[in-house]
Amino acid sequence: MKVLVTGGAGYIGSHTVLCLLEAGHEVVVVDNLANSDAESLRRVEELTGRSVDFLQVDLLDARALDDVFAGGGFDAVIHFAGLKAVGESVTKPLSYYRNNVVGTLNLVESMEKAEVRRLVFSSSATVYGASENVPLTEETPLDATNPYGRTKEQIEDILSDVGHADARWSIALLRYFNPVGAHESGRIGEDPQGVPNNLLPFVAQVAVGRREKVTIFGSDYPTADGTGVRDYIHVIDLAGGHLSALRFLANKTGTFRWNLGTGRGSSVLEVIHAFSAAAGRLVPFEIGPRRPGDSAVSYADPSAALADLGWSAQRDLASMCADHWGWQSANPGGYSADARAKD
């Protein structure tokens, strides 16, 4: 297939582009580089020995998007592009609704004009909100609790309505949990801008010496060690889920929803201890108060993805930490030489 990947220079996007190329697909990436780095694509080319067509395009530029599709001849789109920091979404909700929702509307309208109706959308477990009815299934009621999560929920609604209105569309909504890890080569990985929003990249930056210590938000949850439990999934397993969804959509129409997770939860302390083992050094931490809105436990029921796609996560927490450390230790400041060290 010839696949357009929006946000393909980002963390999950770049790993998915690599897997697409390895599977023999032709890939074109559009990305505005607002929270990504084109160096990731250069390294993908290095790893695969194949070229990636890259266009620096913002999804808010509807005319530029139309131009991309006009000469594209695409068979499918995988849509990652968007703003993604939960905390920032609370302080800048308009930016999130504009970029994520309006950008997706522009994308779908351009696809419609070009008669490209096969789409894999990067959704998120944040659409479930703070539900503690675990494991979370695709039937768990949606109740996002922050603007980022609500943009994902709204986009799911929009795409569902598009698929309902026109039976020619094939749409996969992939709700994934906590992506971590990196390619085993250590050449591509997660390079967050500013202070990391998620646990494992923060732990990695502490381990490599960029930050002093990890703050654990709450140690009195009703869990085995008192710290919050989440479902962490290796980014390569996650990328494989996108390829499985793409294959599924090749000869089916309709709108489909799948959780992509391991189905197992790991506590904050378990993650810190596993990363310490992978790095061969202790990761210092302190206990802080709970954060408002945090759930005690959240993990996926991924059985539908196994049944429908034949997909399941293969890598365990030790592998996730080892690969994430391989990336962080080889690239202590990320892709940039100065590594935003003064953030």
Image (spheres, rainbow, N blue to C red):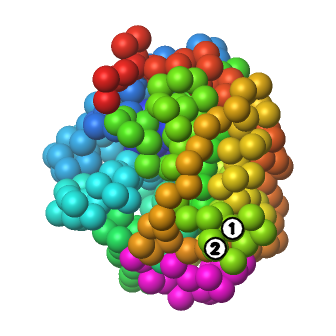
In the rendered image, residue 246, in percent from the top left (x then y), is placed at 62, 54
In the rendered image, residue 313, in percent from the top left (x then y), is placed at 78, 54
Residue 132 shows in the view: yes
Amino acid carrying mark 1 in the image: Gly
Identity of the residue drawn at 47% across and 31% down: 211
Identity of the residue drawn at 68% across and 67% down: 226
Q: Is residue 231 highlighted in magenta? A: no
Residue placed most toward the observer, 271 or 59? 271
Residue placed most toward the observer, 202 or 172? 202
Where are the magenta residues, as a range? 130-145
Residue 110 placement: quadrant: bottom left
Identity of the residue drawn at 70% across and 53% down: 269
Q: How many marks?
A: 2
Q: Is residue 341 left or right of residue 16?
A: left
Disc 1: CA contacts within 10 A as few (<14), some (14-19) or many (>=20): some
| 266 relative to 26, above or below | below
Residue 259 shows in the view: no
Q: CA distance from mark 2 to mark 1?
A: 5 Å
Residue occupied by mark 1: 226
Residue occupied by mark 2: 221
State the SS at label 2. Answer: loop
State the SS at label 1. Answer: loop
Residue 96 placement: quadrant: bottom left
Q: Is residue 216 left or right of residue 134?
A: left
Position of the C terminus, as image quadrant, is top left
